[in-house]
Amino acid sequence: MPANLPPPYKAAEQRFREAKTTEDKIAALQEMMAIIPKHKGTDKLRADLRRRLSKLRTEQQQPSRKGHKGPSYHIPKEDAPQIVLVGSPNVGKSSLVAATTNATPEVADYPFTTRLPLPAMMPYQDIYLELIDLPPLSPDHTETWLPEIIRNADAALLVVDLAADDCVDMFMFVRTTLASKGIRLSPVHDPKETELARNVKPTLIIANKLDEPSADENLEFLKEIVGGEFEILPVCAVMGKGIPEMKKRLYEFLDVVRIYSKVPGRKVDEKKPFIVPRGSTVIDVARKIHREFGDHLKFARVWGSGKFDGQIVQRDHVVEDGDVLEIHVDM
């Protein structure tokens, strides 16, 4: 039986051949494993991919020649949506994190202040969004592990510096650099996207340093060149200008909904809503609450999107933002 490998698989295979580091090779193999069709014609190939992936992971954990392990960074995803901050040196990514979270990253006027990924939780209404401050992308140096963290995120904020006359070039450089790593920045969340989701990052442009003298002129130029494709949010992280609007728009852009749970006979739990993609159903929320709830779901009652409060709905009922769900299971 022929393998019939699709074009995205062949593209990932090419990235594997061209990869220079163990991290990049692992990332390419993981993409190939996710894309490859599962049938008898690919059994041997899938087994070979698993063998190579296992070997590379083992090598990754081995001490280097100097007796030290090579750096391998991974930010596990929490229940909150994860957003990475990408950009050139000194665009103000760390200032943006400091202005929107309780984190205290080092902020300085010299390049490469941020050398490690820094996760921080940004409050928005009654939920949190996870921001990841990343080291900058530079023509001189880009961390080899950085693309994999970007792939794992739900969305990206591409930060540019409005004080710099080359802010458009900054955007173009970041976009081109990530494209060379197999990551495509997208202006929208597209559920019909045929490309592997890990390789397509929904992206907003954050135009920072709005308080600088040349900011207005550079912002107009940025809008003229880039604004027809990507949405641009002007802010001043240091002064807090535009930050509330940015947080609201980011939540909308993620295209998620908040669902509140209710145990039968008790009050609604209003402290920690579950966050699911828009279009999710009762069964999706049940599995989010507890994996076994999805297997044993009988029905649910809904307050919000039903025709009346407490309406009994089935597993395929589509939930809406602010719904309250009371899950009934047969355990």
Image (tube, rainbow, N blue to C red):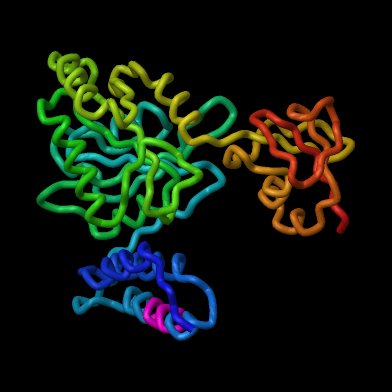
Q: Is 265 left, or right, of 8 in this rendering?
A: right
Q: Is residue 78 left or right of residue 220?
A: right
The answer to which of 189 and 266 lies nearer the viewer is 189
- Residue 70 visible in image: no
131 is higher (above) or lower (below) than 28: above
Looking at the rendering, which quadrant does residue 21 occupy? bottom left
For the C terminus, the quadrant is bottom right
Specify the segment rendered in magenta.
Answer: 46-54
Q: Residue at x 27, y 66 (%)?
A: 15
Total numbered badges shown on the rendered structure? 0
State whether residue 19 is above or below residue 154: below
Between 92 and 281, the residue placed more toward the observer is 281
Q: Is 208 covered by the magenta stretch?
A: no
Which SS type dominates the magenta stretch? helix
Q: Pinpoint residue 282: horizontal percent, then vertical percent.
A: 73, 44
Q: Determine the residue positioned at 20% across, 47% down.
A: 176
Residue 45 vs residue 326: left or right?
left
Residue for point 32% across, 78% down:
59
Q: Quadrant of residue 188?
A: top left
The residue located at (49%, 71%) in the rendering is 37
